[in-house]
Amino acid sequence: MLLALIAVVVYINLQVVPVVEPFFIPTVTPTTNPESYINQAEAYYQEGKLLNAIDAYKQAILAEPNNSSHYVNLTRVQILAGQYEDALENSELALLRSNDNPLAHVVHAWALDFTGDYVQAEASIKTALELAPDNAFAHAVYAEILIDNGDFEKASEESIRALELDPTSLETHRARGYVLYWTGNYERAITEYSAAININNKIPNLHLMQGYSYYAIGEYDQAVSAFNQANALNPSNPTPDYEISRIYLLEGLYSRAIQYASQAVEDDPTNAKMHGNLGVMYAKNGQYPEALEHLSLAVQGGMTSNNEVVNGISLSYDLKVIEIFSSYSLTLARTDRCEEAIPIFQTMLSQVGENEIAVANANEGLSICQQSLDD
């Protein structure tokens, strides 16, 4: 028996122990090639799955964190998806990794433009063009920046140059469409946006801008269709619903206008403009209690039924703001709440007295209140 036990111990030492992994030593796991993440991201982008593409590019960055190109690609898709602040941050990370990468400067300029820093955007895009004078993407972004800066003539030149350099690029057609829209060439803008959509029909902003162009020439059915497509691609954005509600308001279809304006409020419940727009729709439809609920939030601010804070808007010469203040004060007057309405009418006359619509509405409201006092 003793000899048998010795034989077992010898066998374990010689045969079993050498093939057993030592405890507490980490197992080596294979790292996914960043190229596979890039391929995934590009496939998602072509399918219009921008959020999935963004996630895939982030995985590529984790696998290869010092590659500036990964940040450039991520920034571009984030801009197309409307994630402008995140895009700006990643464009800066791209520049930190390679300050001589012209595309890093291009997307940085693009992100700066979308976040409203037009001066820095122009400086950044000029750096990009110094590094790559014939880059179509750079000329396209420069055209958009110039439009936002009000330099329409130079913007037109840049957008044409971008198309000459690359007539197959989504960004060059998009930029040309943007320039044409803001210079009042709406039908040609529709053509350019259609060309961009033919390249990738899953980008919400392209359909949104096409909708604006159709709206500008009175093609309301086409505009609604384009806005609906933008909404389908990005349901959380209140803008398409808002714009559709404005079309139905213009056509006198108040119930439909209320439907879309309500959806816009659901999409962005803390946005005073969305509440004001819905209030205007209710007021037009004669639903005064509902109108006052939303108009009061827009003008005075307050808390929604779901305990969300809304900050009221300030009176200005913006026509949509004047519409909201006019609708609020007139609805107060028509519901015998003149003690609240009259100070608003007086504020409108003193602060936006050069706007004929504001003056006419204020005088009408004061007349209603005076008649109420006489009775």
Image: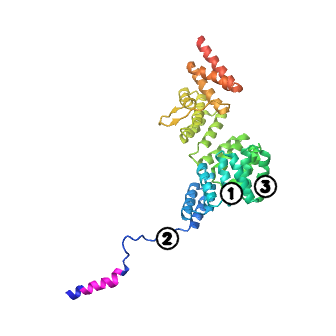
**Span shown in magenta:** 6-17
Specify the amino acid type for callout 1.
Ile
Report the coloring of the rendering.
Answer: rainbow
Q: Earlier in the sequence, mark 3 or mark 1?
A: 3
Q: Quadrant of residue 352?
A: top right
Where does the C terminus fall, quadrant-wise?
top right
Q: Is residue 367 visible?
A: yes
Q: Is residue 70 above or below residue 184?
A: below
x and y percentages locating residue 351 in the rendered image: 66, 25
Image point (58%, 34%), residue name: 278
Specify the amino acid type for callout 2.
Pro
Specify the amino acid type for callout 3.
Arg
Foreground residue among 317 and 109: 109
Foreground residue among 354 and 61: 61
Outermost bottom residue:
3
Q: What residue would you read off at disc 3?
A: 161
Query: Which tag is nearer the camera, tag 2 or tag 1?
Result: 2
Q: Earlier in the sequence, mark 2 or mark 3?
A: 2
Q: CA distance from mark 3 to mark 1?
A: 19 Å
x and y percentages locating residue 297 in the rendered image: 54, 31
Residue 199: give its label. 1
Q: Residues within 10 Å of mark 3 (few under 14, many from 20)?
A: many
Q: Residues within 10 Å of mark 2 (few under 14, many from 20)?
A: few
Question: Could you tell whether 309 is left or right of 11 in the image?
Answer: right
Say what secondary structure mark 2 lies in. loop
Magenta-drawn stretch, dominant element (helix, strand or loop): helix
Outermost left residue:
1
